[in-house]
Structure formats: structure tokens, C-alpha cells
Image (cartoon, rainbow, N blue to C red):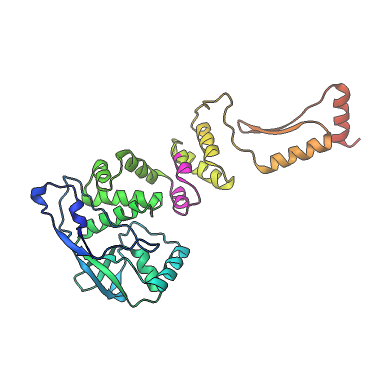
């Protein structure tokens, strides 16, 4: 057993308004199952909510329910299965952080993945730590915990920031302070919500990266962003290719000596290769300014006549 300062003591607030409290908690056992404790931070000018926590208790798994405001909405099945196997072997080593509801049930603040894995492992009861928190503070604690663990994908993180701003009337700077991030980090995350819905879904499903998303956002028009999103998927474009195409669509010149070109469809390259082998000369299939053309090289009049004969079948 060890004596630790309660998480709420980490809130940056004037000492006169937040007397220090201590509680006795079970010492965390570092292993593959345990998760880091939440470090609660609130902006100095936001209302302070009493978030005192009680000692670890054990409650029926059926009395615990997820928080509908949980920022993380995507849980990978294989991760749940791996954790469930570990819980079956060693038990749930870290309590789930919950708050007690008026009907006597408990709502998860942090630890939904552990809750899902405990159900999969067939547990009837799980250890919990009960914290007093209202809806807004529960959202803030859940967001902080997931960000610290890097569990959120970029879209989930962005929506979490926006919900904090809307529900607690916080500025970007206050949100940044609450989650211990730079203001520019929060601002860049919120910009992702300007993506077309199709691009947001692809980012959520991890079919494109944040780099692709930034390239899409650099295109000034909504129509252009949709077009670039589709081209990224259709051509399996790299982030660099997407950035180059975004510059072209925005009317910006490439900083290097060679202007960026949209990647050619695979069939263009295949046809050019076949023609080179058939005609025994260099052949290019090109696309420029919306026009497509085939270039065939020849040495002299005699070579041109040879190529003509090949092409017309004489």
C-alpha cells in the first residue's frame, strides 16, 4: 500500500480555493494490462468542480455502463481480445475509473477498453475507483486520459476538443491548457473538422493519414477538396503525391525546378512500355493541361517510314 496525492490535486488552481486532499490507493502494478493514471488539469479561469475520489471498490460488471460522451469511439477487436486473455490469466490489475449515477449504477470515466475486455473474459465483478464528476468534467477527464495514452485517432481528438469548447465555453487556449497541449496543436486538430465528410470518415478509418488530410485542407475550394480526396483513394497516393497535386489544384508553383505532376494512371505506363517494345523506339504517354498525347521518337526520314509501316501494318 502507498499514500498518493489524489489526481484532483494536480489541477492548477489557487491554493486558497483547492485544499489538498490525500487518499489511500492500491499501488499500481506495471504490466501490459495497467494504464497510466489520469492527470487532471483545468484552466485557471474555468469553474472548479469537486472531483474527490473514493477508495477502490468492487462492483458488478452489469452495473457499469459506458459514457455516451466518451471521446474514443473506435476499439480494435484484436486489442480487446489480447487484453481479455491477459485478464483471464492475471485478473484486472487496475481499477476502472467511474462515477456513480443517481439510480445506483456507474458510468465509466476512463477504462472502457478494460471494461469491454473484462466482459469478454467473463468477469462478474471488477475493481473500480469512484470519482465525483459532472457531465462536463467526466468528458474532460476522459479526453485527457485518452490523449495521454495516444488512444484517439485525429478525428476523435478534434471532436473531443470541440465538445469541450462548446459545452464549457472554453477558448482554444483554455482547452490547450486543460489537456497539456500547445495551442497550435489544438488549432491544427480542430482544422480537421473542415475536411469533407468523406475525408473525415477515411481519416477515422485510418485509410488516409493526417498528412493526407493537411494536403486536402490546403486546397481552397470544397469541390477541389472532394476531388483530391477521391484521387488519393483511387490512386493510392502517398502524402508527397497528394501535396504536389494539392499545389497544382491551388494554382501554386512547385518550389523545385520541376513542376509537380499528377501521377499517371497505370495503364498509361503499361501502354507506353508495350509500344516501346513493339516499335523499338522511345514512346511516352503524357497528360498535360487536360490533354492526353502519345509521343514517338524517330531518328530520321528512314526511321519515320519504318515506324509508319509498323503502325499501319505494311
Seen from the viewer's position, the closer of residues 259 and 21 is 21
Q: Is residue 135 left or right of residue 276?
A: left
Q: Is residue 190 above or below residue 28?
A: above
> Looking at the rendering, in which quadrant would you find the N terminus?
bottom left
Q: Is residue 294 left or right of residue 20?
A: right
Q: Position of residue 60 (x, y in %)?
A: 29, 76
Identify the residue at the far front of this view.
1
Q: Quadrant of residue 131?
A: bottom left
Q: Quadrant of residue 49?
A: bottom left
Q: Position of residue 17 (x, y in %)?
A: 9, 50
At x 54%, y 35%, the residue is 245
Q: Position of residue 285 (x, y in %)?
A: 71, 34
Q: Is residue 251 left or right of residue 28?
A: right
Q: Is residue 198 above or below residue 32?
A: above
Identify the residue at the far right of this view.
314
Q: Position of residue 148 (x, y in %)?
A: 33, 52
Residue 28 covered by magenta stretch: no
Q: Quadrant of residue 220?
A: top left
At x 8%, y 49%, the residue is 16
Which stretch is magenta? 196-214
Identify the residue at the far top of this view.
300
Residue 201 covered by magenta stretch: yes
At x 40%, y 62%, the residue is 32
Seen from the viewer's position, the closer of residues 18 and 227 is 18
> Looking at the rendering, in which quadrant would you find the C terminus?
top right
The overriding secondary structure of the stretch rendered in magenta is: helix
Q: Is residue 13 above or below residue 294?
A: below
Seen from the viewer's position, the closer of residues 261 and 32 is 32
Amino acid at each position: 500500500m502507498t499514500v498518493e496525492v489524489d489526481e484532483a490535486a494536480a489541477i492548477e488552481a489557487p491554493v486558497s480555493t483547492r485544499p489538498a486532499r490525500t487518499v489511500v490507493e492500491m499501488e499500481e502494478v506495471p504490466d501490459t494490462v495497467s494504464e497510466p493514471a489520469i492527470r487532471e488539469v483545468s484552466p485557471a479561469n474555468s469553474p472548479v468542480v469537486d472531483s474527490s475520489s473514493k477508495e477502490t471498490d468492487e462492483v458488478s460488471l452489469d452495473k457499469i455502463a459506458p459514457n455516451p460522451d466518451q471521446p474514443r469511439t473506435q476499439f480494435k477487436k484484436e486489442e480487446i481480445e489480447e487484453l481479455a486473455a491477459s485478464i483471464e490469466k492475471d485478473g484486472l490489475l487496475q481499477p476502472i475509473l467511474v462515477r456513480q449515477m443517481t439510480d445506483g449504477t456507474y458510468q465509466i470515466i476512463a477504462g472502457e477498453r478494460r471494461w469491454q475486455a473484462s466482459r469478454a473474459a467473463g468477469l462478474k465483478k471488477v475493481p473500480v475507483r469512484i470519482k465525483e464528476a459532472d457531465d462536463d468534467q467526466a468528458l474532460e477527464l476522459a479526453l485527457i486520459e485518452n490523449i495521454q495514452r495516444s488512444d484517439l485517432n485525429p478525428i476523435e481528438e478534434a471532436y473531443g476538443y470541440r465538445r469541450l469548447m462548446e459545452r464549457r465555453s472554453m477558448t482554444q487556449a483554455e482547452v490547450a491548457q486543460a489537456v497539456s497541449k500547445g495551442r497550435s496543436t489544438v488549432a491544427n486538430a480542430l482544422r480537421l473538422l473542415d475536411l469533407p465528410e468523406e475525408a473525415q470518415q477515411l481519416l477515422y478509418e485510418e485509410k488516409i493519414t493526417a498528412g493526407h488530410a493537411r494536403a486536402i485542407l490546403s486546397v481552397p475550394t470544397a469541390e477541389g477538396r472532394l476531388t483530391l480526396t477521391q484521387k488519393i483513394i483511387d490512386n493510392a497516393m502517398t502524402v508527397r503525391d497528394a501535396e504536389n497535386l494539392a499545389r497544382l489544384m491551388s494554382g501554386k508553383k512547385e518550389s523545385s525546378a520541376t513542376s509537380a505532376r499528377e501521377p499517371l494512371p497505370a495503364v498509361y505506363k503499361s501502354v507506353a512500355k508495350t509500344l516501346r517494345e513493339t516499335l523499338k523506339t522511345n514512346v511516352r504517354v503524357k497528360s498535360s493541361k487536360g490533354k492526353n498525347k502519345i509521343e514517338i521518337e524517330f531518328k530520321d526520314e528512314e526511321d519515320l517510314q519504318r515506324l509508319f509501316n509498323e503502325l499501319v501494318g505494311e
